[in-house]
Image: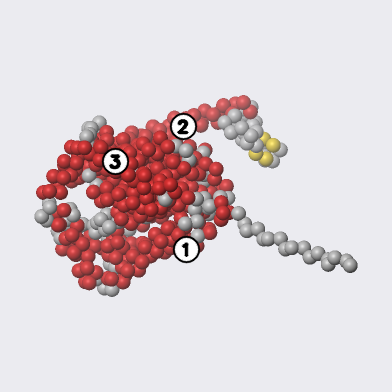
Amino acid sequence: MSVKRPWAPLLPGLTVRSSYRPLGSGFIGARGRQRAWQFCLCVMLCAAPVLLVARLGMTLTLFVVLLAIAAAVAVASPVAFAVIVLAVAPLPDVGALVGVSVPVGFDPVTLLVAVGAGMALQRGVSFPFRNEPALVWLTCLGLGLLAISWFRTYGQAAATASSLALLVKPAIIVAGGVLAVQMLPRTRLEETLACALGAILLVIGLSVALQRLGLYTTVAQEANAEKLQLKQYGGVMISGNDAGAIVAVFTLPAFVLLRSVGRPMLAATVLLASVPVLLITMARASMIALVCGLAALAVLDRRAARGARVALGVVGAAAIWTATIGRPQVDILVTNLQSTSGDANATLSGRSVIWDEVPRFLHQADHGWLVGGGLDSFKTYAETALGNAFATHNAYFAYLTNGGAIMLVAAVALLVAMWNAAGRAKESVRVALRTALISIAVLGLSANVDVFTRSAAWIWPLAAAAVIMRRSVDLIPPVRAARPRRTAPPCD
């Protein structure tokens, strides 16, 4: 028989086929059972927040509730899922922003990737990179080499949550970026991606400006103010270097995409806002990366010299800003450069001394030039040689020290594969992805920024969009020319 359960008003349409009589049917009627189930459900919903607060504390409970709401909204709308993933993917530490210690596994990106994977399986969405085998294999190779280097350093001892995060986060970054684009309707893909990147960049820039004015700060920034010094103005990105990196790499791609979808005012706002934000962050490497990105845009976008005109416009706006409102920041930057002008090491913020130790480290390691010393092995060496656990401050040296020439070649090949994948994409996406790749390649010369770091996480949505949004000429199958019909010879 078909039995309507007491939760029917809460879950309409749910009918259970059963040959057994409902529990308690001999004592109370259907309406009484319905009220009993509703009462139990209300008790559980009311008790759950109280138990969470008692167990986790008020702040962490609010964080968990917001996380659950975000997951529910993401399940309800693919567009909301993509926007939420794009918003939280580049954040270095969500727990540091809200001042709580987030338990392992409660990272928002990890939860959203799990939700997105389930949605993709349930909807039967196709994998976007299925037509790019080189990109797929090189991505897997890069993650595999990272896992091997991690095992050489951390796998011999008992694994900790922080060490496991070093292994899992790169894969989560890749999966989150691909799923964010994979779930979007094809008709709204470019517009959603463009508006999301532009809006998030403006939020990051606004948080940097508000922090500079003393109206906003995070718990992590207050605790590390002396350590960060001038680089403390990172807004929601916490560090000025991280804020400068994401602004330098993705401002021009966001501008190109917004211009393509008919949002010229938002595109111009995002582009012009990058100048004061980079000056506040004092991230000199990011400034150079943005200049190189402008040069790349001038070469890649040659239709009616649009790229060159954009580059000249940004240079002109930067000149006006630095001569007026931004003059105090320029004075600080010039003073720092003049105070270290006679010392190359000080000019490079101590990088030259660190870079000089990289060949020595590779020489003393077993087959160091070929396979490196393992993930973060250079930090252990630097703590002894330099008195501090310095990173390499160079993505290419990081590849060498972590996995040797094998990892370096694989990383460069992955960049080349992304570049080639962009060649068959729609013009706006092609220009956006290639501009971002050039900025990442330049920024990696003086910072540990690559395609697997969170500050460059948006490179994967751009790559997935480039593969999905093929040029129309590639999507139209070739039409065979019709054979001419044979005609009979004229009769005499």
Q: In the image, which disc is placed on residue 471?
A: none
Count of marks overlaid on the render: 3
Query: Left or right: where does residue 477 sit relative to residue 41?
Result: right
Q: Nearer the viewer, residue 325 or 90?
A: 325
Residue at left offset 56%, top offset 55%: 474
* Residue with the mark numbered 3: 316
- Give the distance between the C-alpha atoms of the residues marked 3 and 1, in whole angstroms: 41 Å
Q: Nearer the viewer, residue 67 or 294?
A: 294
- Give the distance between the C-alpha atoms of the residues marked 2 and 3, in whole angstroms: 58 Å
* The residue positioned farthest toward the bottom in the image shown: 367
Q: Quadrant of the C terminus?
A: bottom right
- Give the distance between the C-alpha atoms of the residues marked 2 and 1, in whole angstroms: 50 Å
Q: Secondary structure at mark 1?
A: helix
Query: Left or right: where does residue 395 sit relative to residue 352?
Result: right
* Residue with the mark numbered 2: 45
User: In front of the other: label 3 or label 1?
Assistant: 3
Classify mark 1: residues with Cα within 10 Å, few (<14), some (14-19) or many (20+). some
Query: Left or right: where does residue 75 sit relative to residue 154?
Result: right
* Residue with the mark numbered 1: 134
- Report if the CB atoms under discs 2 and 1 are less than 8 Å apart: no
Amino acid type, label 2: Leu
Q: Secondary structure at mark 3?
A: helix
Classify mark 2: residues with Cα within 10 Å, few (<14), some (14-19) or many (20+). few
Amino acid type, label 3: Gly
